[in-house]
Amino acid sequence: MHTHVIQRFIDSHALPQSYAGDAELWFVPLAEELVVASKHNESIGSAPFVLGISGCQGSGKSTASELLETLLLDQGLVVARLSLDDFYLSRQQREELASIAHPLLVTRGVPGTHDIGHALKTLEALRDTHRSSGVALPRFDKPTDNPLPSKEWPMLPARHNRPAADILIFEGWCLGVTPQSASELAPACNSLEQEEDQDGHWRGFVNEKLAGDYQSLFSKLDRLLFLEAPNFECVLNWRIRQEARLRTHGSRSSRPAPALMSEAQVERFVQHFERLTRHCLLQLSSVADTVFELDTNQRIVGRR
């Protein structure tokens, strides 16, 4: 039954045929577990069931989220899919933040560059069983570095005396991680921090934000899946591949997009994430409910 669904997914996403076996082995059983979990949450009045998917850049979070959505829809469930990326502040908002707090905050990605209040309100709207209107799911357009206009967001219709979704799949590169200690924050971890955050103000700001509303958001997760990279060194190569795909597929917006990042720009961009990515690799492998172990080619090779 899943075979045709998976094949359509592979065809629509131009994935290698080897993905079919991986999907059957790793994601079909997980989807079946999620069906049971969602029914349990509904029975106790705690729907939707919220699955968090965490993993570094290029680890396959978006593909995993879309595949699980496809499998769950095939089971007749109503699924909402969101990313932490969908709640990025606009370019203008980040430029204002950069002028007030630290210049590095103009770059989207780290805690402090998202509208977490909006994310929490969206989750609450999905849980509301008395809504008379649907729930809009925000979307961010990375090539233009701004949120898509709200009129272009997908909408989940309201359901009488039921939440708008049975399951929410929420993915993000740092979901589930906790703040670092002062001693961990003190030394610079790369040339970006050495040269542009000499006094540690930027990383301190990021850590403070992570300790605040981000933890409130993470507490809403019913289950956390961690896509575990072999090491941090994989991240740059994966992110370069990801940028190439963005370049190929273009913007989801109908407006022209500016040029995407060069390899040198990607290398600098990834350094913004290095500290917390390394922290996630140390912490989440023992914190997450389910860990999918990845090899250097981004394929899943184990589950624990």
Image: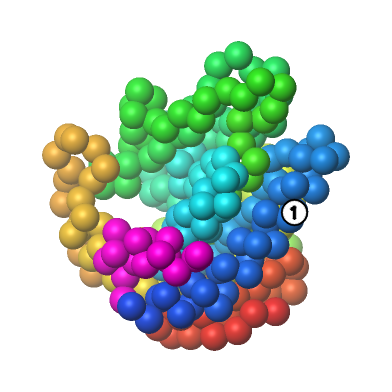
Q: Residue at x 62, y 24 (%)?
A: 159
Query: Does the segment drawn in magenta span residue 53?
Result: no
Estimate the x, y position of residue 236 in percent, counting from the top left. 37, 74
Compared to 199, does 167 lie above or below? above
User: Could you tell me if residue 74 is visible in this image?
Assistant: yes
Q: Which residues are magenta?
A: 1-16
Q: Residue at x 39, y 49 (%)?
A: 107
Residue count near mark 1 (Cα–Cα under 10 Å), binned few <14, some 14–19, many ≥20: many
Q: Residue at x 67, y 54 (%)?
A: 35
Estimate the x, y position of residue 207 in percent, counting from the top left. 63, 53
Residue indicated by mark 1? 37
Quadrant housing the C terminus: bottom right
Q: From the viewer's perspective, is 9 left or right of 211?
A: left
Which amino acid, mark 1?
A: Ala
Magenta span dominant secondary structure: helix
Q: Residue furthest top?
A: 132
Rendered image quadrant of residue 214: top right
Compared to 126, does 221 lie above or below? below
Q: Nearer the viewer, residue 74 or 47?
A: 74
Q: Residue at x 33, y 78 (%)?
A: 17
Q: From the viewer's perspective, is 226 left or right of 105?
A: right
